[in-house]
Image: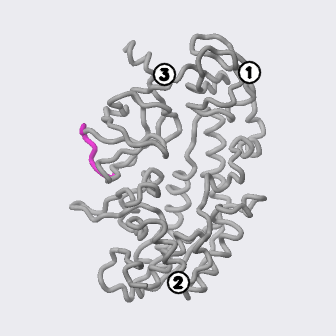
């Protein structure tokens, strides 16, 4: 196999001898290949794994990360590559900053994104500190995003493979962090990455990708919240936008904005969706799909990697949605045409082409009827 398959750019200059690279190793194929690419440059490479949780079936589930077998896989890869490998216990910090926040957000009627909280907390903040303490020249990860040197410094861009792009989850990356980070897989396709792993004989070459949220073993978010917050299942009314009480629910944690299934309010002339969640009154507000249209969202706690000004941007408001045209007006993000399924607790990430301009958290949305009245 030719050297083309190993092409990557750590942007450390042409001579990497004498450099030190810390690689965040989760035990999956992506971070393992990053470690292999780093070691192949000739730089001193150190693998670091954060143990984030270790409870019950989540540890054994295929496609998890940062626990149990995954840590053993990371260590085996490091041994195969002949690089140092360290494991640091961050379970308590992960629980406080990610899992507890996840439960509290659901109880407040919001839709959290724990992967962003993890990236902006334990994965980057703590890993940065560890990498710097180890005297590393950079921290490399297996995220599918690209770091591009622009006229004013490092820029964050979407991955070359749209199906793998993780830029939405990295909007909170600061400029200082971006200057120190390297993303060798951002220009690669997944089959290319697996081919490298197979060529180098890594045991994780065909390991399944991580699925869903790492600390939710079976995709049942409500059961996780219930274990953390036993008082989470407080029932209440299911109320139509017109004020009619249509039924009862068993807790807000079972519902998210845009949800249609599981409402159990049959006999309605049109399909009904969750329009919003009223945590103060423990009410699930439902209505027709048209009521999900949102002309604007108020955003908070922004992290900008570029000057936004009043230019038109492309805004992505859900991890699986396509960016849509919008404009930033103070703390309000106004969509050129109403967007559907915008939920408080999610993130709004702004793009200029492939470049990530930054993003913020969605605090509230403006309903179409309210916008018309205004």
Residue 219 image label: none
Magenta stretch in the rendered image: 305-311
- The correct choice, above or below, for 51 with respect to 296 in the image is below
Residue under numbered circle 2:
200
**Horizontally, is 160 left or right of 166 in the view?**
left
Of the two numbered discs 1 and 2 in the rendering, the one whose residue sits closer to the viewer: 2
In terms of secondary structure, where does tag 2 sit? loop
Q: Residues within 10 Å of mark 3 (few under 14, many from 20)?
A: few
Circles 3 and 2: CB distance less than 8 Å? no
Q: Secondary structure at mark 3?
A: helix
Residue 320 location in percent, x, y?
49, 45
Distance from label 1 to label 2 (Cα)?
Answer: 57 Å
Side of 266 where 333 appears, left or right: left
Numbered mark located on residue 290 in the image = 3
Assign the magenta stretch its main secondary structure: loop
Q: Circle 1 sits on which residue? A: 248
Q: Is residue 151 above or below residue 168?
A: below
- Outermost residue toward the front? 1
Classify 355 as above or below 286.
below
For mark 1, does the 10 Å Cα neighbourhood hold few (<14), some (14 to 19), or many (20 or more) residues?
A: some
Pick the quarter of the image with the N terminus. bottom left
Nearest to N terminus: mark 1 or mark 2: 2
Q: Are marks 1 and 2 in contact (CB under 8 Å)?
A: no
In which quarter of the view is residue 229 placed?
A: top right
Relative to residue 178, is residue 198 drawn left or right?
right
- Out of 150 and 96, give the one closest to the viewer: 150
């Amino acid at each position: 196999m030719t050297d083309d398959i190993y092409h990557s750019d750590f942007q450390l200059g042409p001579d990497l001898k004498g450099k030190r690279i810390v690689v965040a190793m989760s035990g999956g194929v992506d971070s393992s290949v990053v470690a292999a690419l780093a070691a192949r440059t000739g730089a001193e490479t150190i693998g670091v794994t954060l143990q984030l949780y270790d409870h019950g079936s989540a540890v054994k589930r295929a496609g998890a990360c940062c626990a149990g077998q995954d840590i053993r896989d990371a260590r085996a890869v490091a041994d195969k590559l002949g690089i140092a490998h360290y494991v640091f216990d961050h379970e308590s910090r992960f629980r406080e900053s990610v899992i507890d926040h996840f439960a509290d957000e659901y109880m407040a009627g919001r839709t959290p994104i724990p992967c962003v909280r993890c990236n902006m907390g334990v994965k980057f903040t703590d890993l940065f500190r560890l990498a710097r303490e180890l005297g590393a020249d950079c921290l490399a990860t297996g995220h599918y995003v690209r770091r591009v040197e622009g006229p004013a410094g490092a820029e964050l861009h979407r991955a070359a493979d749209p199906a793998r792009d993780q830029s939405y989850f990295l909007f909170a990356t600061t400029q200082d962090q971006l200057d120190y980070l390297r993303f060798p897989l951002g220009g690669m396709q997944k089959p290319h990455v697996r081919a490298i792993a197979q060529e180098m004989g890594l045991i994780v070459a065909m390991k399944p990708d991580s699925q869903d949220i790492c600390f939710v073993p079976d995709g049942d978010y409500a059961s996780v919240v219930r274990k953390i917050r036993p008082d989470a299942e407080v029932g209440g009314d299911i109320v139509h936008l017109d004020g009619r009480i249509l039924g009862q629910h068993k807790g807000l944690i079972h519902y998210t904005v845009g949800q249609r299934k599981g409402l159990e309010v049959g006999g309605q002339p049109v399909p009904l969706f969750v329009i919003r969640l009223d945590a103060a009154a423990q009410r699930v507000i439902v209505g027709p799909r048209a009521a999900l249209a949102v002309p604007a969202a108020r955003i908070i706690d922004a992290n900008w990697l570029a000057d936004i000004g009043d230019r038109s941007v492309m805004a992505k408001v859900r991890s699986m949605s396509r960016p849509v045209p919008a404009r930033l007006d103070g703390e309000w993000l106004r969509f050129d045409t109403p967007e559907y399924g915008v939920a408080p607790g999610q993130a709004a990430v702004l793009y200029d082409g492939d470049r990530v301009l930054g993003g913020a958290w969605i605090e509230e949305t403006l309903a179409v009827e309210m916008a018309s009245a205004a």
